[in-house]
Amino acid sequence: MLNIIREVFSYRKQFLSLLVGVPSYEKYVEHMRTHHPKDPIKSRKEFFCEAQEARYNGKGGKVSRCC
């Protein structure tokens, strides 16, 4: 039973990130190293800003839609 609880809690961060639409930087890095080893890997900040831009279509830091 304790092992099941530990496993559930180990996925909480991933679940919450997916729930609110924030992609995983760690998964991005893993993908880049595996499939695109010669390409540069973005910093965490660059990755997050690009993800926000893609999700909210922000122009100059402003959200251009409400939903």
Image (cartoon, rainbow, N blue to C red):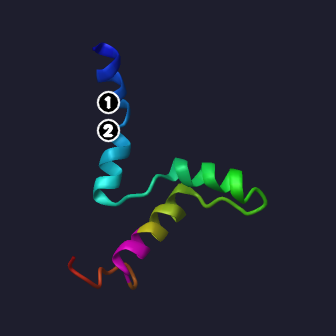
Query: Is 55 colored magenta in this rendering?
Result: yes
Image height of 48 relative to 16, above or below: below
Residue 8 is left or right of residue 47, and the answer is left
Query: Is 54 colored magenta in this rendering?
Result: yes
Image height of 1 relative to 20, above or below: above
Residue 35, image quadrant: bottom right
Marks 1 and 2 sit apart, C-alpha to C-alpha, by 5 Å
Image height of 65 relative to 4, above or below: below
Label 2 sits on residue? 12
Q: Position of residue 47 (x, y in %)?
A: 52, 62
How many residues crowd around disc 2 within 10 Å: few (fewer than 14), some, or many (20 or more)?
few
Q: Residue 9 carries which label?
A: 1
As rendered, which of 36 and 52 lies closer to the eye? 36
As rendered, which of 46 and 9 lies closer to the eye? 9
Q: Residue 54 carries which label?
A: none
Residue 67 is left or right of residue 44, and the answer is left
Q: Which residue is drawn at 46% across and 62% down?
A: 48
Q: Position of residue 3 (x, y in %)?
A: 35, 17
The quadrant in which the N terminus is found is top left
Q: Residue at x 56, y 55 (%)?
A: 28
Question: Do the numbered discs 1 and 2 sit on residues whose CB atoms are within 8 Å?
Answer: yes
SS at circle 2: helix
Residue 40 is left or right of residue 64, and the answer is right
* Amino acid at circle 2: Arg
As rendered, which of 10 and 65 lies closer to the eye? 10
Q: Where is residue 20 in the image (x, y as percent from the top left)?
A: 29, 58
Q: Which residue is drawn at 48% across and 70% down?
A: 50
SS at circle 1: helix
Q: Give, as a single range, the part of the protein colored magenta.
A: 52-58
Q: Which residue is drawn at 34% across and 60% down?
A: 21
